């Protein structure tokens, strides 16, 4: 028995032509044939590419399955919340029938008990990042704090807190699962107005021209580049206005060794590889 060099599936040598799982050609070289060095090098390149594609497909499949699990858990949570709401309404009704003076103190105790219930909704992350604080900031409309926290998350995942900026390698190697989670949270709580995928769509619509993108999302107004403190922190801001991931001080300065335009192009390229 041998293992497929791409996916590791066991097979019987000299009896199997193609892997039953990934389809890799398992036909052995003829006994008397001696492949050239050039051919062997080409085969090695092809094998490395196949391994990378197989791993990418597995990661995508795992993420899809995890997303389905999360949807089921959220649905179950919604049902449980509805049940609790019905019980609270019944309690309030009974209190009104009894002693109105006890309502305030009883409600206070109920609120304490409800707030003490831990939020068990799991966050989707390849590195164990906790996104509950970001979700809470977005849910309460604290857009600036949510944007600042998003930047902190990016630095923490890339282990760049001390430097305060992302390199090209950091962006290229950033986990796609976490980018999807960040994008989905921003879209969900802004009713589809903000998010990485919203910015990506605008980027493509302007042909990858950073200046035109900034004009569209409000990072540049009447040829004046916006400073971070001048951004709009409300739902009336232009579509794609937030989050800010390509620059920090001013829209034309960038962050780290890359310009803002180079940073944004790199981020969009990463988004494109993950179908975001």
Image (spheres, rainbow, N blue to C red):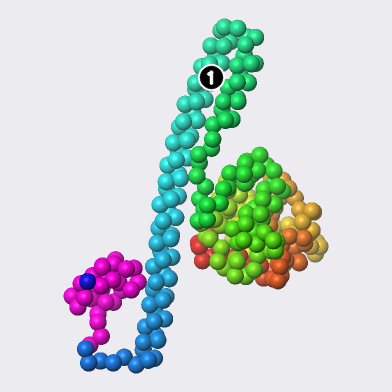
Q: Is residue 26 left or right of residue 156?
A: left
Position of residue 271 measured from the top left corner of the image (x, y, whole percent): 55, 63
Looking at the image, is 133 positioned above or below residue 26?
Answer: above
Q: Which quadrant, please, contains the N terminus?
A: bottom left
Q: Is residue 216 left or right of residue 181?
A: right
Position of residue 207 measured from the top left corner of the image (x, y, whole percent): 62, 69
The verdict on residue 13 being magenta is yes
Label 1 sits on a secondary structure element that is helix
- What's the residue at 45%, 45% (across, down)? 70
- Say whether residue 66 is visible: yes
The verdict on residue 119 being magenta is no
Q: Of 213 and 127, which appears nearest the observer?
A: 127
- Say whether residue 220 is visible: no
Q: Of 151 and 85, which appears nearest the observer?
A: 151
Position of residue 163 measured from the top left corner of the image (x, y, whole percent): 70, 64
Q: Is residue 79 left or right of residue 195?
A: left
The answer to which image quadrant residue 169 occupies is bottom right
- What's the residue at 50%, 50% (across, down)? 124
Q: Furthest residue to the left?
A: 15
Q: Which residue is mark 1?
A: 89
- What's the residue at 77%, 62% (across, down)? 250
Position of residue 21 measured from the top left corner of the image (x, y, whole percent): 29, 66
Looking at the image, is 191 positioned above or below residue 272?
Answer: above
Q: Residues within 10 Å of mark 1 (few under 14, many from 20)?
A: few
- What's the residue at 63%, 50% (across, down)? 193
Q: How many marks?
A: 1
Magenta stretch, main secondary structure class: loop
Q: Of 249 and 8, which appears nearest the observer?
A: 8
Looking at the image, is 109 positioned above or below residue 242?
Answer: above
Q: Which contiguous range is marked in magenta?
A: 2-30
Q: Furthest residue to the top?
A: 98
């Amino acid at each position: 028995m041998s293992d497929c060099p791409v996916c590791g599936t066991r097979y019987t040598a000299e009896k199997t032509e193609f892997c039953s799982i990934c389809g890799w050609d398992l036909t052995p070289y003829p006994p008397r044939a001696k492949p050239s060095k050039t051919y062997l090098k080409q085969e090695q390149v092809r094998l490395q590419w196949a391994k990378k594609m197989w791993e990418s497909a597995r990661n995508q499949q795992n993420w899809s399955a995890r997303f389905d699990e999360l949807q089921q858990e959220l649905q179950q949570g919604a049902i449980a919340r509805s049940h609790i709401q019905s019980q609270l309404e019944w309690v309030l009704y009974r209190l009104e029938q009894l002693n109105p003076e006890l309502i305030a103190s009883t409600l206070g105790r109920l609120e304490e008990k409800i707030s003490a219930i831990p939020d068990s909704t799991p966050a989707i992350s390849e590195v164990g990042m906790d996104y509950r604080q970001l979700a809470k900031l977005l849910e309460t409309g604290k857009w600036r704090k949510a944007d600042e926290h998003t930047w902190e998350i990016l630095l923490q995942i890339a282990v760049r807190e001390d430097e305060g900026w992302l390199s090209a390698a950091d962006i290229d190697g950033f986990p796609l699962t976490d980018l999807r989670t960040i994008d989905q949270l921003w879209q969900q709580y802004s009713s589809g107005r903000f998010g990485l995928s919203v910015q990506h769509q605008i980027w493509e619509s302007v042909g990858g021209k950073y200046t035109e993108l900034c004009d569209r999302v409000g990072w540049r107004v009447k040829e004046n580049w916006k400073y971070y403190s001048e951004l709009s922190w409300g739902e009336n801001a232009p579509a794609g206005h937030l989050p800010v991931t390509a620059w920090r001080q001013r829209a034309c300065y960038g962050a780290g060794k890359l310009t803002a335009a180079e940073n944004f192009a790199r981020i969009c390229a990463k988004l494109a590889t993950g179908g975001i």
